[in-house]
Image (spheres, rainbow, N blue to C red):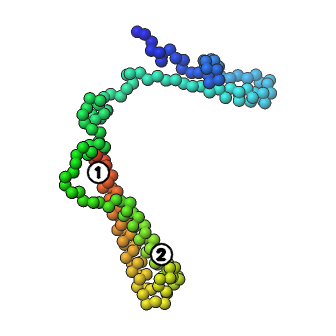
């Protein structure tokens, strides 16, 4: 049985010289105790700069078995991958439009900011935009409306965004074949 070309390659190379000179270095360093400490440290530092490159070859037997490979990944299979299964089918029924989760999340954030801002503006009696002055009869009802309806609305919109995101994730998992 002939050796493969990868089997004849050395397993470690010296990056400075390109041969196996550094693999022949002794593994245990022994320095005479009479050498000054500075010289011993310089010699240790010199050896620590040596770097090795290890080459590893894979064999045919190390490949995973075909059982772990999905059926659509087989070269002879006509089955499309999960992300391409819906492309060939044209939907004749009118699908309903669903609002993406990030729209709910953005609306929730804006509503929460407006509601909390209304609470702060009412407590300071200092109108920020000057649309309603603090002595107007509409000042308290308008700010109260924003504060009392804004916080529950933002909580509702946040829950709707989580629900929409979970629904989109479940649909993607279904298309990918996980569920």
Point out the tag, 2 or 1, that comes first from the N-terminus.
2
Q: Is residue 178 visible?
A: no
142 relative to 15 in the view: left or right: left
Q: Residues within 10 Å of mark 1 (few under 14, many from 20)?
A: some
Look at the numbered disc 2 and give the secondary structure of its residue. Answer: helix
Q: Residue at x 43, y 85 (%)?
A: 140
Look at the numbered disc 1 and give the secondary structure of its residue. Answer: helix
Outermost residue to the top:
1
Q: Residue at x 31, y 33 (%)?
A: 73
**Residue 83 location, quadrant:** top left
**Residue 161 location, quadrant:** bottom left
Q: Is residue 65 above or below residue 81?
A: above
Q: Quickly name the residue at label 2.
A: 117
Q: Quickly name the residue at label 1.
A: 171
**Residue 164 percent location from the top left of the image:** 32, 59
**95 or 111, which lies in front?**
95
Q: Residue at x 47, y 75 (%)?
A: 117
Q: Is residue 2 visible?
A: yes
**Residue 52 location, quadrant:** top right
**Residue 78 percent location from the top left of the image:** 24, 34
Q: Residues within 10 Å of mark 2 (few under 14, many from 20)?
A: some
């Amino acid at each position: 049985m002939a050796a493969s070309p990868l089997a004849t390659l050395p397993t470690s190379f010296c990056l400075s010289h390109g041969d196996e000179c550094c693999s022949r270095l002794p593994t245990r360093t022994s320095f005479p105790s009479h050498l000054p400490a500075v010289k011993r440290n310089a010699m240790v530092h010199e050896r620590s700069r040596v770097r090795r490159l290890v080459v590893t070859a894979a064999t045919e037997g190390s490949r995973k078995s075909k059982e772990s490979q999905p059926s659509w990944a087989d070269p002879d299979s006509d089955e499309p991958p999960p992300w391409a299964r819906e492309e060939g089918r044209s939907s004749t029924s009118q699908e309903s439009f669903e609002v993406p989760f990030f729209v709910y999340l953005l609306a929730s954030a804006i509503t929460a900011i407006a509601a909390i801002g209304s609470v702060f503006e009412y407590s300071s009696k200092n109108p920020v935009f000057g649309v309603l002055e603090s002595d107007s009869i509409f000042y308290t009802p308008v700010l109260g409306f924003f504060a009392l309806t804004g916080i529950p609305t933002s909580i509702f919109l946040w829950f709707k965004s989580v629900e929409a995101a979970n629904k989109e994730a479940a649909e993607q998992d279904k298309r990918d074949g996980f569920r």
